[in-house]
Image: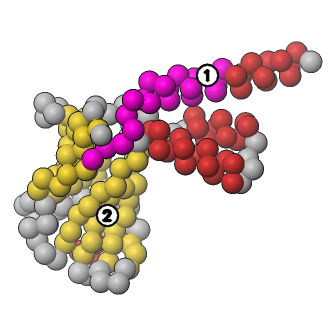
Amino acid sequence: MNQQVLFIAVIMAMMAGYSQKADALDTIKDYRINKIIGDANKNVGADIEYKTYRQLCSDVDNKADKEMLSADKKSELLSKVPQGGQITILIKGSTVERSRLGEWTLLIKDESDKELLRKTSNYRRIQHDKESWVGVEVVLIPFSVPATFNVHLIPPYQTEGSVFKLTTI
C-alpha cells in the first residue's frame, strides 16, 4: 500500500514539474525563421526547421495517445524533452559529398552576439529528394532559448555560411 502511495506521489510530482515547465514556456507559441545570409554557393543550400519545447511536448502527447503508452512511459518521454526545443539542419547539395554534414558547425547566439551553443556535426544521414541530396541532423537544445536568437550554419569548404534569425510570434 505504501509503495502504491509513493508511486502515485512521484507521478504527480513529475506531472506537476512538466506542467510548471510548460506554463513557464507557454507564452512562446512559435518562432518565425528569417534567413539573413546564405546560399551564395548555388551547389549547396542550407535550411533549418525549429520546434519549440511546447511543440515537442505536444508531439509526445500525441504519440503517447496514439500508441496507448502508459502514464509512466509518457512521463518518462516528457521528462526527456529538451527545454529549448530542437533544430533540424537541412543541407541540400548537388552531390552526395556537398550534402554531408561532417564538418558543418551550428552556432546559436543571442541578440547581443553572445554564444549560447556550438556544435560541430558528425552525423552522416543523407537522403535523396527529386532534385538534390539532403544531409539531415537534429540538434537538441538543453536550455531555454531567448525570444530572439540567431542560428549560424558554418560550412567547412566555403567562407560564407547561412544565418537565420528566429523571433517569437
- Residue sitting nearer the eye, 164 or 126: 164
- Residue sitting nearer the eye, 118 or 67: 67
Q: Is residue 18 above or below residue 167?
A: above
Quadrant where the C terminus is found in the figure: top left
Residue type, label 2: Leu
Residue type, label 1: Ala
Magenta-highlighted residues: 13-32
What residue does disc 1 label? 16
Which of the 4 image quarters holds residue 66? bottom right
- Residue sitting nearer the eye, 30 or 122: 30
Say what secondary structure mark 1 lies in. helix
Q: Residues within 10 Å of mark 1 (few under 14, many from 20)?
A: few
Horizontal and vertical percent for residue 77?
61, 41
Q: From the viewer's perspective, tell me whether residue 29 is left or right of residue 63.
A: left
Q: Which mark is residue 37?
A: none
Horizontal and vertical percent for residue 68?
75, 50
Residue 28 within the magenta-colored segment of the rendering = yes
Dot 2 or dot 1, earlier in sequence: 1
Residue 94 within the magenta-colored segment of the rendering = no
Quadrant where the N terminus is found in the figure: top right
Q: Is residue 152 above or below residue 53?
A: below
Query: What residue is rendered at 49% in x and 25% in y?
Result: 23
Q: Which mark is residue 90?
A: 2
